[in-house]
Image: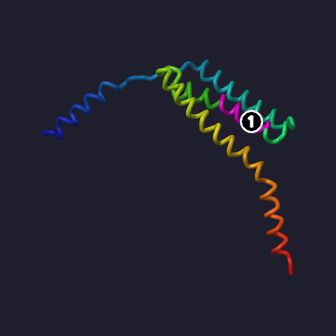
């Protein structure tokens, strides 16, 4: 008996959402977002060929990737139409993760001489008679 009541209540809840459309996006908006993403992708490729150096290239690429991710999250995940706090929390979390990944990858250059020396020592030991 209790199980039937629970299913009836859940069925009524599901029926209330039948045929509901979320945010219908216009083709012009979708094409505009797609073009924007393509422009930013082209900009990433262009900037990677400018010889900025590894750290500057990485920073530029991460900034462009963050902008692209923001476009995708706000439009395709419908955060633009949701409460603004959700958008800010989601983008803030994403930027926080990107910050730590960026710090991790740029910190690698501090230890590169030690890694190269260890690799050379290991290679010398393995080729020594």
Taking 47 as reference, is 85 above or below it? Answer: above
| Farthest-out residue, bottom | 129
Foreground residue, 17 or 89?
89
Label 1 crowd bin: few (<14), some (14–19), many (20+), radius 10 Å: few
Foreground residue, 71 or 9?
71
| Secondary structure mostly seen in the magenta stretch | helix
Q: Is residue 108 magenta?
A: no
Horizontal and vertical percent position of residue 65: 68, 33
Residue 127 falls in image quadrant: bottom right
Foreground residue, 21 or 129?
129
Question: Residue at the spot x=68%, y=28% of the render?
Answer: 37
Residue placed under numbered mark 1 in the picture: 59
Horizontal and vertical percent position of residue 24: 49, 20
Residue 6 falls in image quadrant: top left
Question: Residue at the spot x=63%, y=37% of the render?
Answer: 98
Foreground residue, 24 or 117?
117
63 on left or right of 113: left
Taking 21 as reference, is 9 above or below it? Answer: below
Q: Kindly state the secondary structure of the residue where label 1 is placed.
A: helix
Question: Residue at the spot x=79%, y=64% of the render?
Answer: 118
Residue 76 falls in image quadrant: top right
Dividing the image into 4 quarters, which one contains the N terminus? Answer: top left
- Residue span colored magenta: 56-67
Q: Is residue 63 magenta?
A: yes
Question: Residue at the spot x=82%, y=68% of the render?
Answer: 121
């Amino acid at each position: 008996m209790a199980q039937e009541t629970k299913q009836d209540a859940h069925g009524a809840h599901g029926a209330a959402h039948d045929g509901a459309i979320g945010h219908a996006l216009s083709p012009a908006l979708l094409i505009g977002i797609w073009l924007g993403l393509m422009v930013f992708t082209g900009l990433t490729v262009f900037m990677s060929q400018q010889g900025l150096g590894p750290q500057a290239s990485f920073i530029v690429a991460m900034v462009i990737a963050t902008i692209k991710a923001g476009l995708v999250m706000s439009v395709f995940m419908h955060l633009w139409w949701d409460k603004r706090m959700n958008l800010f929390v989601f983008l803030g979390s994403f930027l926080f993760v990107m910050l730590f990944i960026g710090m991790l990858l740029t910190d690698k250059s501090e230890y590169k001489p030690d890694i190269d020396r260890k690799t050379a020592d290991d290679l010398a030991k393995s080729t020594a008679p």
